[in-house]
Amino acid sequence: MNMRSAKAPPAPADDRSTPARIRDAALVTFAGAGFRAATVRAIAERAGVSPALVIHHYGSKERLREACDAFVTGFVRERKVEAMKAGPSLDPLALLRDEDDRLPLLAYLARALQDGSPAVATLVDEMIADAEAVLAAGVESGLVRPLDHPRGVAAVLTLWSLGALVLHEHARRILGVDLTGPMSNATLSAGYTVPAMEILTHGLVAPGMYERLATAAEAAASAASAAAGSAPTEEAS
Amino acid sequence: MNMRSAKAPPAPADDRSTPARIRDAALVTFAGAGFRAATVRAIAERAGVSPALVIHHYGSKERLREACDAFVTGFVRERKVEAMKAGPSLDPLALLRDEDDRLPLLAYLARALQDGSPAVATLVDEMIADAEAVLAAGVESGLVRPLDHPRGVAAVLTLWSLGALVLHEHARRILGVDLTGPMSNATLSAGYTVPAMEILTHGLVAPGMYERLATAAEAAASAASAAAGSAPTEEAS
DNA sequence: ACGCGACCTGAACGTACGTTCAAGAATATG
DNA sequence: CATATTCTTGAACGTACGTTCAGGTCGCGT
């Protein structure tokens, strides 16, 4: 009945420690079903252990989740310093896409983003700070246009990127791409990256049109300044 | 014990039918806690009825959820035809922001987007089609730059917008704005709409830089075409 | 050989949940 | 007024869950 009794030398084909196996199984299960729907019993079964052992090693399901959060956030931070040397990237998720791991890191991140764990929240804050730094570096190098609201732009870009990740099932249905998969996938590039880059590089407004709109709006605003609480008719998508 | 026995004439301060009251209570509870965490008992308590009555009227919790989905999607479609006359908008959510209702429609939509209900999925598809139509109209009027990938751009814009909505708690923490609240809110405009518009109108790349990058990338690609599976270093945020 | 601590399990406990059921109250119908 | 129909409830049922517990097995130091 005991897995480890299958003779020590020939190695059980899984050299991970039991707590690590349980954590990985929890990662997969949480990513697939969400924290609340994922049961301790399902995690235990995937890890090949009893439910009691899961609790024995992690104390509670909540603490197991914290361990998963810590593992994923730590993994992202590790990869980040590695990626620093390989040149900056506007995609905070690029670090995770190349993994050939069996661990669905991006899918777990998508779940954790929704469930609002504190560890992931600080990770998001760091991602925004990184994005702001990357943008500032781009401005300095002349590649990026000087921004009116650097922090806001970095925050919105990160929110959009992570938001699309959370909605990866919709992205798959609509665009036929898997946002949680490796970015080297050609369909991902064609379905998502190319349109995204088109928006981010060129913008949507025809050249010269913005200035015309701005002056027109300014004139309209000064003319109708008495109107209270009115919102602009053109809004961000 | 019976609410309705409080004499008919003075109106019970809630003229909604009991099924409607239950549906509204379910909407609020689902929006606040998510479908799985929201219990039938909590919904019943908010509606001022017994848990048994909730099941009696809707058959099951799942069917109650379908009723909520149908109500919200129907509401969005109603507002859409109204908004058609008031001029086009790039924001598919603008229709829902102005509501002074007690019903957290946008918060519910954010939950439904995550849980993946079929009704909301088709609503997303319609939103993308609408966005594509609005963009095409903008191109025709000369306001929007002609797009290389109209459908992809519409899909990505919608995904980003809805994704930010789903992450509204992160947006509140980071930007101090409530994406589920009325859009007339000044802080929303300053924290989210302005940076978003800055990205969408101007783009991020400095003028003339894209062409330089494109030709450089082309040259690099033809030079190193032998390298397999390599991804571009610059990615969409 | 022996005990000790770490590792692991089957069975059970308590709880919270969705749902069912029989019956009471209110309302409509003759 | 009598009766049928609808609306509503308290109590309970069955289930699935996180967690606890007593004990079993294994490796290792002495």
Image (cartoon, coloured by chain):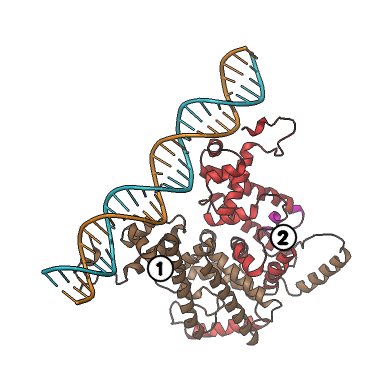
Chain colours: A red, B brown, C orange, D cyan
Most foreground residue, C11 or B69 = C11
Q: Residue A185 location in percent, x, y? A: 74, 62
- Residue pictured at 71% horizontal, 77% vertical: B148
Q: Residue at x 85, y 65 (%)?
A: B220
Q: Which mark is residue B162?
A: none
Element at label 2: loop
Total number of numbered labels? 2
- CA separation, marks 1 and 2? 39 Å
Instruction: Please give the residue where the numbered disc 1 appears in the rendered image.
Output: B103
Give the residue at the far bottom of this rendering. B141
Regarding residue B27, the answer to whether it shows in the image is yes
Task: Tell me the amino acid under the disc marked 2.
Answer: Met
- Point out the stretch of residues depicted in magenta: A84-97
Viewer-side residue, B143 vs B228? B228
x then y, percent, for residue B48: 31, 61
**The numbered mark 2 sits on a residue in which chain?**
A
- The numbered disc on residue A183 is 2
Q: Is residue B99 left or right of residue B6?
A: right
